Image: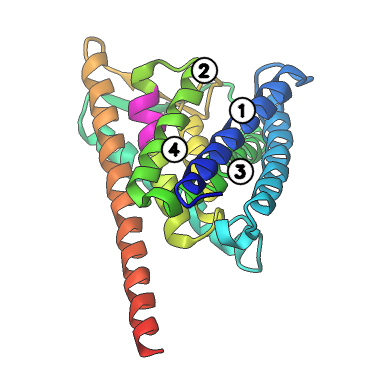
Amino acid sequence: MTHTARPWGSFGRVLLFLVACAIVLAITASISPARSGPTQDLFIGSIASLGAFILTMLFVRWDGLRLNDIGAMPGRKSLHRLAFGFLLGSLLVAVHSLIVSAAGHMHWVRTSGAPVDRAVLMAVGYLCLAAREELAFHGYPLRRLQQLSGVWRAQVMIALVFALEHVAGGWSYAQALWGAAVGSLLFGMASIATRGLAVPIGIHAAWNFGDWMRGNRAMPGLWHPDVAKGFEDRVSVAGILAYVAVMVLATLGFWCWHRSREAARARMAKLD
């Protein structure tokens, strides 16, 4: 194979991986024994995560790499990093909630009849779904594209595909762009900066779980937003702007972390 053909072959394998993960997700969703709800999320997330991990092992071997090379190998510190990511994601949800509340005309109220014990099942379900999406997008595909085209080009390409999958799942193009794609930039940069998937899985799961807790998901949460009549559009815009600001700032934080680690590695290489 010529030198110029190799990148195209690698791009082709990344595309094939993304398509294969989407097929696994579609098949898993079609055979789910449960209706919409936490049990379905748990089933789809766990089975599709296993499928994405098996595909990762196959494609990594195809490329002559190791799971460590793309950050998908569990280690002794994985649980600690997962917990750190979950705490960080929870903090981002809290900051976003404070900003939206400070903008005025809305507040959160307790949802009557919402069972507290459902929260544990919801958290586990969102954790499994987050693991599937991080394996499918910010493991092998992102890290291979990073090697081929650099950090930000890889980030943009994966963010667009991530958004398209959410469009296929019923999201509007605006929701997919300002929601999923922007979130993908944070999860991807966390993967690159930490050289692993535990932190982005934690952040991703915490954000989705926190969004459910405050009533921003299809399934009723423990709280729900109470918006003053006539201010619905204003509150919606404030929520979007606050979300983009929080996600972008967190992404830049991980980017700075990545740059500092790369600079330290360069200094160590010079000393050697």
Say if 112 sits above or below 20 in the image. above
Say if 269 sits above or below 258 in the image. below
Image position, residue 78 (x, y; %): 61, 62
Number of residues whose C-alpha sits closer than 10 Å to that of mark 3, classed few (under 14), some (14–19) or many (20 or more):
many
Q: CA distance from mark 4 to mark 3?
A: 16 Å
Residue 168 is tagged as 2
Q: Tell me which label, 3 or 1, sits earlier in the chain.
A: 1
Q: For the residues carrying marks 3 and 2, which lies nearer the camera in this image?
A: 2
Q: CA distance from mark 3 to mark 2?
A: 19 Å
Residue located at (46% from left, 30% from top): 161
Residue, disc 3: 131
Q: Tell me which label, 4 or 2, sits earlier in the chain.
A: 4
Say if 53 sits above or below 111 in the image. below
SS at badge 3: helix
Q: CA distance from mark 4 to mark 2?
A: 15 Å
Residue 9: image quadrant is top right
Residue located at (50% from left, 35% from top): 208
SS at badge 4: helix
- Dominant SS of magenta comes to helix
Disc 3 marks a residue whose amino acid type is Ala
Number of residues whose C-alpha sits closer than 10 Å to that of mark 2, classed few (under 14), some (14–19) or many (20 or more):
few
Q: Tell me which label, 4 or 3, sits earlier in the chain.
A: 3
Q: Are marks 2 and 1 in contact (CB under 8 Å)?
A: yes
Disc 1 marks a residue whose amino acid type is Ala
Q: Which portion, as a residue range, is magenta?
A: 176-182
Disc 4 marks a residue whose amino acid type is Ile
Residue, disc 1: 22
Residue 180: within the magenta? yes
Q: Relative to residue 104, is residue 27 drawn left or right?
A: right
Q: Tell me which label, 2 or 1, sits earlier in the chain.
A: 1
Image position, residue 122 (x, y; %): 62, 34
Residue 158 is tagged as 4
